[in-house]
Image (tube, grey):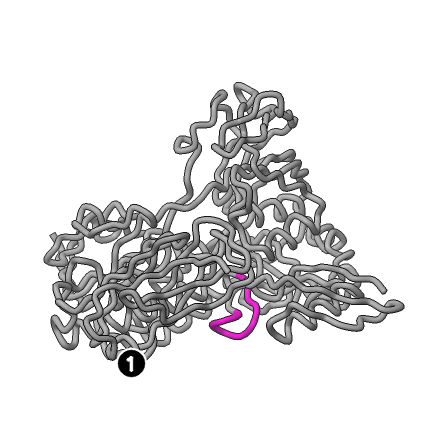
């Protein structure tokens, strides 16, 4: 049996988690104070994911750049592929929160969406 | 000079100002004006493009601009007036706010109540006493954040970060994602001043070393930063000779604390806490100047914007009540009970509480001065302990809270003193 200690990133509480793994299967999670901690621990030891945020250049708008994010979390190993795909991306104003900026970014099946209105 | 009249003037259109304005309107005050010095509302949230905001307020994880967007939408729905590119120069004790912008020039607003929501600013290099030359390439972490996220510029390629506050940690990740090499994060104290989740997500995820009890002892380069020397410090925070390590880099980011921006509050005569550098307030978030309220990072530096919104909502409500009922909240009220923070608790907000006036429950927020493990947060009414709550971990970087109950305070005979302290197991 393997034990891994994690710090939950589900919210700013940062609960210290202890995960017990038996033959590649999570057998128990302790230390969490909510359901989110349990979910995070199971995912983090099997398939860790992250939300990636960045900003891209806007042309013809009131601001120089618009902030963006992956609409859902993506596998941790894909972070730099996504950053590479965002390099050089330019959009035309107006941009609204939720607009798709890049669809299926780096073949993750996840879209990049705007997180700010730039008019 | 142009002179206008509003019931409530709010100084600052960041998260605190926005939430205060919406709350004041929803509590029955029509005439509200928000004054913002930047070219858009939202304050610092506009450059905080990372996610993790709003879990308490909206029960979902938003980025900074999205969180600000929600409140800006509410402000527009409530049809609350605001002025951008507007700098407040002065507030007089009869609540005349003097401000200026390009369209109106210098102008005055007579307000019935004022809410201070100016936020905070970063501690600068000048305040840190770092030896070495003054080359280009030294930025506060927040300046670098604005350049990268909003202006589209990269401040440098090889980076050393001094200070492990949240903005420094966030920028370690951000610079790495944009292709820079972050060589090390040095922290003077033996613990990080940032949230644990940020250490995991921003440093550990990318293999960036965090060196606790280290500081910058030299900066190389005359025109541009060429290298940084850090050294370990002893328990008195003095560099230990022989522990120096040199890093070749072109950029130094400073994330060494935030200071509430209270110049206009001070000149107005608002009494300040030497611990928080923010106003001393009662449970209505009212300062010693009647009808002047404070909320958000200008009051005390928060780590969660959700708590800023909550606090600002309360300030907006109390300001609205003040406008509607007049001086229902006299600061000289004899029944204001002082709250003393001691033995590990550094301060409390509010500083006084009035059992007659308070809501059924009141959250008192505070910070601890050191890292505590398996200790208790205790609250005493006079000499009697009424709260004794075990906390597995407490750290200076994370705000703590205790909840005081009206019935408990009101029922206590001859209450003269409330004390918040940390006790060992």
In the rendered image, residue B300 lying in the magenta stretch gets the answer no
Q: Badge 1 is on which residue?
A: B407
Q: Would residue A27 appear left or right of B323 to someone viewing this image?
A: right
Q: Position of residue B137 (x, y in %)?
A: 53, 30
Query: Can you tell which quarter of the image residue B35 is in?
Result: bottom left
Q: What type of secondary structure mainly makes up the magenta span?
A: loop
Identify the residue at image location x=71%, y=45%: B207
Q: Which residues are magenta?
A: B55-63
- For label 1, the SS is helix
Determine whether B172 is above or below B337 in the image.
above
Q: Position of residue B82 (x, y in %)?
A: 30, 63
Q: Position of residue B268 (x, y in %)?
A: 17, 50
- Camera sees residue A9: yes
Chain for disc number 1: B
Identify the residue at image location x=39%, y=73%: B74
Identify the residue at image location x=47%, y=49%: B370
Q: How packed is label 1: few (under 14 Cα within 10 Å), some, or many (20 or more)?
A: few
Identify the residue at image location x=38%, y=58%: B421
């Amino acid at each position: 049996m393997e034990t891994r200690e994690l710090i939950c990133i589900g919210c700013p509480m940062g609960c210290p988690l202890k995960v017990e793994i038996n033959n590649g299967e999570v057998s128990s999670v302790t230390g969490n104070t909510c359901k989110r901690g349990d979910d995070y621990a199971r995912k983090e030891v099997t398939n860790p994911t992250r939300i990636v945020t960045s900003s891209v250049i806007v042309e013809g708008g009131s601001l120089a750049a618009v902030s963006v994010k992956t609409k859902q979390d993506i596998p941790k190993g894909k972070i730099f592929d996504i950053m590479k795909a965002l390099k050089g991306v330019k959009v035309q104003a107006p941009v609204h929160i939720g607009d798709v900026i890049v669809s299926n970014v780096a073949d993750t099946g996840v879209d990049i969406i705007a997180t700010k209105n730039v008019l | 000079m142009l002179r206008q009249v509003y019931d409530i003037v709010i100084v600052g259109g960041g998260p605190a100002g926005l939430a205060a304005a919406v709350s004041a309107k929803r509590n029955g005050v029509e005439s509200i004006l928000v004054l913002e010095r930047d070219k858009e509302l939202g304050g610092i949230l506009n450059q905080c493009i990372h996610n993790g905001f709003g879990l308490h307020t909206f029960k979902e994880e938003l980025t900074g601009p999205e969180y600000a967007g929600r409140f800006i939408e509410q402000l527009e729905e409530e049809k609350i007036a605001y002025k951008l590119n507007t700098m407040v120069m002065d507030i007089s004790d009869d609540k005349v706010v003097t401000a200026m912008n390009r369209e109106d020039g210098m102008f005055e607003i007579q307000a019935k109540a004022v809410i201070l929501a100016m936020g905070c600013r970063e501690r600068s290099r000048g305040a840190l006493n770092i030896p070495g030359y003054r080359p280009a390439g030294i930025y506060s972490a927040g300046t670098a954040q604005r350049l990268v996220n909003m202006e589209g510029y990269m401040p440098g390629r090889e980076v050393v970060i001094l200070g492990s506050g949240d903005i420094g940690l966030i920028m370690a990740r951000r610079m790495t994602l944009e292709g820079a090499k972050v060589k090390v994060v040095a922290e003077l104290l033996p613990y990080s001043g940032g949230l644990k989740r940020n250490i995991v997500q921003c440093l550990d995820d990318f293999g960036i070393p965090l060196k606790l009890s280290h500081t910058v002892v030299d900066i190389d380069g005359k025109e541009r930063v060429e290298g940084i020397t850090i050294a370990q410090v002893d328990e008195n925070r003095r560099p230990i000779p022989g522990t120096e390590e040199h890093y070749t880099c072109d950029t130094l980011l400073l994330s060494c604390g935030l200071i509430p921006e209270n110049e206009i509050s001070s000149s107005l005569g608002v009494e300040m806490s030497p611990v928080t550098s923010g106003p001393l307030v009662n449970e209505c978030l009212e300062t010693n100047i009647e009808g002047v309220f404070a909320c958000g990072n200008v009051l005390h530096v928060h780590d969660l914007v959700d708590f800023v919104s909550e606090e600002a909502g309360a300030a907006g409500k109390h300001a609205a009540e003040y406008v509607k009922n007049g001086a229902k909240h006299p600061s000289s009220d004899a029944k204001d009970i002082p709250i003393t923070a001691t033995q590990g608790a550094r301060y409390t907000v509010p500083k006084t509480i009035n059992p007659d006036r308070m809501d059924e429950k009141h959250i008192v927020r505070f910070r601890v001065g050191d890292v505590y493990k398996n200790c208790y947060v205790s609250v005493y009414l006079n000499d009697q302990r009424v709260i004794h709550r075990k906390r597995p971990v407490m750290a200076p970087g994370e705000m703590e809270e205790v909840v005081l109950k009206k019935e408990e305070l009101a029922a206590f005979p001859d209450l003269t003193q409330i004390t918040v302290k940390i006790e060992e197991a």
